[in-house]
Image: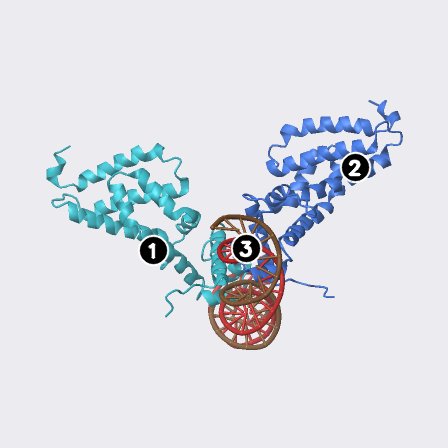
Chain colours: A blue, B cyan, C brown, D red
DNA sequence: TGAAAAGTGTCCGAAAACCAACAGTAGTAA
DNA sequence: TTACTACTGTTGGTTTTCGGACACTTTTCA
């Protein structure tokens, strides 16, 4: 297959326009209420072109969610280590850099929950996996269920991420202390018994 | 020829993209520094397509300036009467409504001064004409030159317009008094001698 | 000054997008 | 039920855009 499979610019533009249109429409309608015709009208593309790119509106949503999921997945490990080590500033900074131009898109897609296209659920699932792995590796003699603590950690991290995406980097200082306090509380539960006595 | 000569959507999109690209580039470069290649790169259009729409970058600028000039010209008379009668709020409100989506574009184009494409100069010229006509019609026995007073009036009005375009409607109240005071001072000079005694 | 680099404007075959029309499928209201 | 309206996917002929090459001019800088 082609090593360099460059897409025609027209395809890129068309897909960009269609995706932007969907996001725009999601600001005022639910995904179910949006029709292919709506998307085409707003993006100034013909319906035949739409169907040349996507099977239907669900396929469009799938591909968008997949794209952001892959982008996030490629860095979960890094982001995870950052929250575990209390590097909240680095976490937020790196996250916002990765998502730079896509913040708005991700925030909007977080509100859509379709069976096979749920960005928020995908993010949570990826994080949960990391937390489970981490807990199993580090904590040997745990007195609380792994699933519970993984869920706690995941939700803390997810909250930080969603807050960062909608508020940006400027207000970070105001919340790092609170986040770290909660993080510590979670970490104590996860550490093996013998390490607890260190505190 | 076709009575209804509807343009292909692709043409509309291409021209929109090219024009947006030029405006964007004007935020960081002068018009002279901008190349056709720059515009094409930013707008994701091929150079051959650019030349299918415009003769060169000057033609592009001309067409944009012409468009806004025509839009403004279709209302000068109305806007003129508004300032003469001291209806500053109506002037600003109507102006902003007409220019709604084009404020940014107009503000940017006001900074470009090319021999055959100077939006600011066009606006001024249209206003000056109105003021001259007005003064000649109303004032019979003037003791100051028509050109001077027309220029004064035009500059006052132009200042209001530029201020409104960049500041919007919200801050209007803070300046109407000042504008009206200056307007009155100009109007007094324009009125025939016998009317001056009314004050 | 002279050679390299960057920009201009034009051309053409191939690819993509357009439009309009089509049959088919809900959902809705008389 | 029927008839109406709105939306879905698909098709084929037409128009536009693309990409890359071309000859040419202008700018850069060693």
Circle 3 — which element?
helix
Q: Mark 3 lies on which chain?
A: A
Q: Which of B119 and A182 is in front in this view?
A: A182
SS for dot 2: helix
Residue receiving disc 1? B70
* Residue at the spot 67% in from the left edge and 52% down from the top edge: A63
At a point 20% along the width and 50% down the height, the residue shown is: B133
In the rendered structure, find residue A131 and report the number of the disc placed on it.
Answer: 2
The Cα–Cα distance between marks 3 and 1, rounded to whole angstroms, is 34 Å
* Quadrant location, the C terminus of chain B: top left
Circle 2 chain: A
From the image, tell me which residue sits under label 3.
Answer: A37
Kindly tell me whether residue A85 is visible in this rendering: no
In the foreground, B43 or B193: B43
Q: Using residue B124 as the reference point, say whether residue A62 is left or right of it.
A: right
Circle 3 or circle 1, nearest the eye:
3
Give the image location of residue B80, x and y in percent: 27, 46
Residue A86 has which mark? none
Whether the residues at callouts 3 and 1 have beta carbons within 8 Å, the answer is: no
Using the rendered image of the protein, determine whether residue A88 is visible from the camera's viewpoint.
Answer: yes
């Amino acid at each position: 297959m082609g090593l360099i499979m460059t897409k025609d610019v027209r395809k890129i533009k068309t897909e960009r326009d269609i995706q932007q249109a969907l996001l725009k429409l999601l600001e005022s309608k639910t995904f179910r209420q949006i029709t292919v015709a709506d998307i085409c009208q707003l993006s100034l593309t013909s319906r035949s072109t739409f169907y040349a790119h996507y099977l239907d509106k669900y396929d469009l949503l799938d591909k968008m969610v997949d794209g952001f999921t892959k982008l996030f997945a490629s860095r979960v490990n890094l982001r995870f280590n950052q929250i575990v080590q209390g590097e909240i500033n680095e976490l937020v900074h790196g996250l916002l850099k990765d998502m730079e131009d896509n913040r708005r898109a991700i925030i909007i897609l977080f509100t859509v929950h379709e069976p096979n296209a749920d960005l928020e659920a995908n993010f949570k699932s990826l994080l949960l996996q990391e937390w489970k792995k981490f807990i199993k590796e580090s904590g040997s003699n745990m007195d609380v269920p792994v699933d519970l603590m993984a869920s706690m950690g995941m939700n803390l991290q997810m909250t930080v991420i969603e807050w960062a995406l909608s508020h940006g980097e400027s207000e970070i200082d105001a919340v790092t202390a609170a986040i770290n306090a909660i993080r510590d509380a979670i970490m104590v539960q996860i550490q093996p018994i013998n390490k607890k006595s260190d505190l």
